[in-house]
Amino acid sequence: MTIQDLPAKLVQHLFFTLVPVAIGFLLGVLIGILLSRKPKLSGIVLPILSVFNTIPGIVFIGLLVLVWGAQSATVLVALGVYATFPVLKNTYAGLVSVDPQYIEAAKGCGMSAIQSLTQVELPLAMPTIIGGLRMSTVYTVSWAVLASMIGGGGLGDFIYAGLSSDNSELILMGAIPAALLAFVLGSLVDALQRKVVPKGIRRGGSAA
């Protein structure tokens, strides 16, 4: 494995990052919205998810390999599940923390529950939701290294090859691009936050 393999491995790693994050964001927002509407259900589901989230990724992928075999879909599902947790928790936290007076005001203006959610609650919760997306993205960059354990490819190939051969150069060839990728993607999510979140309700911003 040489430096010439780096571009292809980087593309593979990006694939194993972006697809699970997209899946995790969609599921996290949808489930977070559902749990914010069902307090009793959230009291059961969130503690279970917290316990599940403590299971090491390598163990979860190993269990899925036993069921589905060593294939890319196995890694994508495993990483998608883990990518869901930060978005789900932040979506739930953001929605339940919306000041009730804004919800009442929306009802007073004749808004339906869906309109209140999409036009009032979600915009107010968006800084917290985007924060969950950022965590999910950065974490998934590191978790995607696990794809190499079942031959999925990615930057983890350099790291595992370096560890098995005691070659620090190979380890750095995988670790440094992974760290840079996490930084770049995290910065892109920050840029997304500035784009979609009104200035007055961004973190650190003052309300108008």
Image (tube, grey):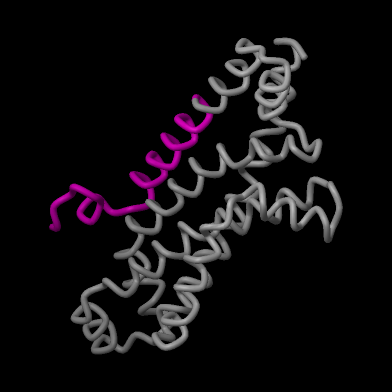
Residue beneath the point at 26% across and 86% down: 109
Q: Position of residue 149 (x, y in %)?
A: 75, 38
Q: Is residue 201 above or below residue 44?
A: above
Residue 59 lies left or right of residue 67; in this view the side is: left
Residue beneath the point at 70% across and 10% down: 3
Q: Position of residue 50 (x, y in %)?
A: 47, 65
| Residue 20 or residue 100, whichever sits in front | 20
| Residue 152 or residue 113, whichever sits in front | 152
Q: Magenta includes 191? A: yes
Q: Quadrant of the N terminus?
A: top right
Q: Quadrant of the C terminus?
A: bottom left
Q: Position of residue 184 (x, y in %)?
A: 47, 30
Residue 89 lies left or right of residue 155; in this view the side is: left
Residue beneath the point at 44% across and 47% down: 135
Magenta range is: 180-208
Residue beneath the point at 33% across and 72% down: 121
Residue 142 lies left or right of residue 65; in this view the side is: left
Q: Is residue 145 above or below residue 40?
A: above
Q: Is residue 89 above or below residue 104?
A: above
How many numbered marks appear?
0
Find the residue positioned furthest to the right. 69
Q: Position of residue 72 (x, y in %)?
A: 79, 46
| Residue 49 or residue 183, whichever sits in front | 49
- The dominant secondary structure in magenta is helix
Find residue 97 and report its image quarter: bottom left
